[in-house]
Image (cartoon, helix red, strand yellow):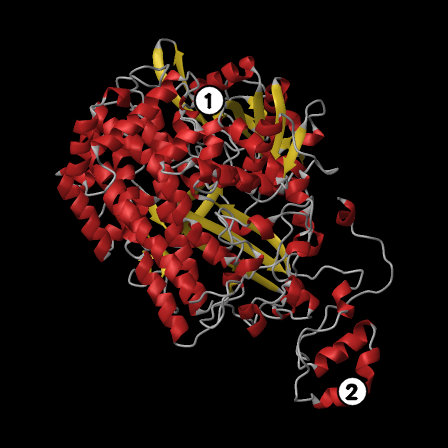
Amino acid sequence: MHLLGETLQETFTRKGITRRDFMKFCGVMASALALPKSTADLIARALESPKRLPVIWLELQDCAGCSEAFLRTPTPTVGELVLDVLSVDYHETIMAASGHAAEAAKQASMAAGGYILVVEGAISTADDGGYCCIAGKSSMDIIQEAAKNAVAIVAIGTCATFGGIPKAAPNPTSAVGVMDVIRDKPIINLPGCPVNPVNLSATIVHYLTFNRLPEVDKLLRPLFAYGAKIHDNCERRGHFDAGEFVRQWGDEGHRKGWCLYQMGCKGPVTFHNCPTVRYNNGTSWPVASGHPCIGCSEPGFWEMKTYEPITLYEFAPPEQFPSVEKPSREINPAAVAISGTAIGFITGAAGAIAYNALTNRSGHQKPEIETEEAEKSDHSDHT
Amino acid sequence: MRAVENALQIKVPTNARLIRNIIDAIQFVQDHVVHFYHLHALDWVDIVNALQADPEATAQLAQSISDWPNSSPTYFKAVQDKVSKFVASGQLGIFANGYWGHPAYKLPPEANLMAVAHYLEALDWQREVIRAHAILGAKNPHLQTYLVGGMSTPVDPESEMAINANKIAQLKQLFAKARLFVEKVYLPDVLAVAPFYLDWVEIGEGLGNFMSYGDIPLIDDFDPDNPEHMFFPRGIILDRDLSKVHPLDPEMINEYVTHSWYTYDDESKGLHPSVGETKPNYTGPKPPYDFLDVDKKYTWLKAPRYDNKAMEVGPLARMLIGYASGHERTKFWVDAVLTKLNAPATILFSTLGRVAARCIETVLLAEKLEEWTDELAANIAKGDLAIHEQVHWDPSTWPAEAMGWGYTEAPRGALGHWIHIKDGKIANYQAIVPSTWNASPRDASGLPGAYEAALIGTPVANPEQPVEILRTVHSFDPCMACAVHVLDAEGKEITRVVVMD
């Protein structure tokens, strides 16, 4: 077990994992970070260093969900890797010490400096900070004090990044995210409710390997994890393109894994790597379990109507692509009226629906698509 | 969700009821084990003292209490070597500043080493078994398949994208693994450690009043007041009297804000949560501060009361109410543990009683997981693929006004939500979470909550290192950052708990 100070290679040897497997793992991490395979050697060298990177982990206006997520960092390697290379000097929930002894451990680590500051939860700015005090200090004082000697700050979860649920209207505590109050330190934002622990470990590995933080978008989110929309990599994208939609919980389309767009899916406006890394050691993610994406990693997700379809502004390009399925021998009587000879000349949405009808897919309608060039969604230009 | 279902009188389909029960059960099992090993054990286990253990003797100890396979001298030697190397590194990380070497630690080195090994094993175990939540609920923590009216987890034996035979098999494999660890490691560890801390059956008693809303409905048309219908029966126990389980009347719940940073028009009275108010009014000191004035308002928690009595909620409350209601398996396991410890049921009213009750509850649920999964499979096999009550999904079908009470038993205890729906919108919403009951401040008549009552009379050997206080507070599994201050006023030792967050 990694907690106890052995190097990663020793952990692996003890577990009967060969050098070859270790290098393979480094290769997997390289691809998780969207890096070339050739960087695996670099990652391996960084991970074999016996000195562990100090971490101070703050919990402010939070629910400990991101801490719980951290405990689920998947086996066999990523979690052991993270805990083996880190020295978590302060973490209220999992540390052995409490009260004054815990605060003293934090003070010692802050004085030594050179740590990564992980922040979970929002910062309260109302009423002198009385809404969130730990050991008599306001969340604002706590974060400013801890940020001072930090090498970098990793804000995890949607609360620490964008204010999250505490910031939901009417925001009684005037909750804000880390980047709203700390301006003089490098900050990485890893939103999500909770953070995907794979992205946390990948960020730390990136730092250890290259001695710098990963590249980020304008919301300070690393591109390797937040560079693409959920919609772009969704395993159900084919059903969206084919016009196959879930209409009711438990209907045939729902049981077959069709697209959840009509049930309110926010995948088209959410930048996150859920479809590729999934959760709980790759077991599942919301869409794979039959629930639409709620956009939990986007700023202000709590204001979106969960079960209402979002507005789409453009045709999905494959609309104009030919179907891979042969037209059925049974012609739908309703479609006959359209005339079979027209199929070759169909363009646009109406034609596509007619074409789908002829190929016996008439039960599945396209979303209502607005064709005018409307103002783009706020989220469409993050990349 | 249940509050809305209650307001709209929705009955969820059988599959949804069973899936929710299974999710609940594995949540309890995983959460209780994490609480015991990772959030509570180090109050009882001296990790540094484990360095003095003889691995050979540790192996003998482990083999004498369980046939769990990880019990060889080589295994324990390897764990000890790693502890040794970790300590030598000078970077103690999450173990820094623990009260190691404190005289209140009573375990022999071998028991400490065994417990440290199981701390590490449990860390791997919890991550694996909770994958069941991802199968049924998309991810853990923060599951995402709950719907008003059912679940969004499709079931279909003929689809790879739904709960099918493959997923049932995966669940059963995880549940077998869960149960094995609980029966071969957690339960034997608690039984092995408890005899060294038997003085803790007389410390931390607390209120003697216990409450459970009841949960895990065993049939579709359940009556929550019928103990036969609920795996955790509903009820109230007063003044440690196990001969009578009083019926629970949700109308008797009130919340006071006398010592809380909220305002009511008349703070001498409590408000029922269905008409509850949450108007923040911070009157505490400007931070930073050293102490709060407990004669005034001093917390963000309200003071919930049942029939104007403070109540303890959680595993101990559930096990006592189950025991006193005659729940067969609860009686079996409670009696088995008491026999093993050679002690009467009254020892349960204590800090150690809470630790034991949490373990017993875990055993009870762990042995049901596979059975309930089979029940789900059997229901699907009948051709029932319904997961959602469709009728009320569209808010246009709702009445102009409706009130609802949603209740559940969370691992930490009774959890209630109250909703007032008006014109398709939420007019009022109030929640009373388990830790509000247990960590409650004083009410209008000055009655203390469960933590405070339990800490009265706790002997503290060294006020600078109050591990004894931690033992009792942690035995409740508190859901918040809690700061514990011990102060010396006028030469008299006073302990008080200041709850924050």
What's the chain of the residue with tag 1?
Answer: A
- When the figure is inspected, residue A281 is found, relative to residue B483, above or below; the finding is below
Residue furthest to the right in view is A373
Q: Which mark is residue A340?
A: 2
- When the figure is inspected, residue A250 is found, relative to residue A332, above or below; the finding is above
Q: Residue at x 42, y 69 (%)?
A: B14
Mark 2: secondary structure: helix
Q: Residue at x 65, y 67 (%)?
A: A239
Q: Residue at x 78, y 46 (%)?
A: A381
Neighbour tally class for label 2: few under 14, some 14-19, many 20 plus, Cα within 10 Å: few
Mark 1: secondary structure: loop
Residue A13 visible in the picture: yes
Residue B264 visible in the picture: no
Alpha carbons under labels 2 and 1: distance apart: 72 Å
Viewer-closest of A173 and B130? B130
Residue located beneath label 1 in the image: A50
Q: Residue at x 69, y 48 (%)?
A: A228
Q: Is residue A75 left or right of residue A164?
A: left
Viewer-closest of B255 and B404? B404
**Where does residue B87 sit, x and y in percent of width and height?**
37, 19
**Where does residue B200 sit, x and y in percent of width and height?**
24, 29
Work out whether mark 2 precedes mark 1 in sequence or the reverse, and give the earlier one: 1
Three-letter code for the amino acid on which mark 2 is drawn: Gly
Three-letter code for the amino acid on which mark 1 is drawn: Pro
Q: Which mark is residue B320?
A: none
Viewer-closest of B50 and B233? B50
**Where does residue B334 sit, x and y in percent of width and height?**
21, 47
What's the chain of the residue with tag 2?
Answer: A
Image-quadrant location for residue A174: top right
**Where does residue B392 sit, x and y in percent of width and height?**
57, 69
Image-quadrant location for residue A142: top right
- Image marks 2 and 1: residues in contact by CB distance under 8 Å: no
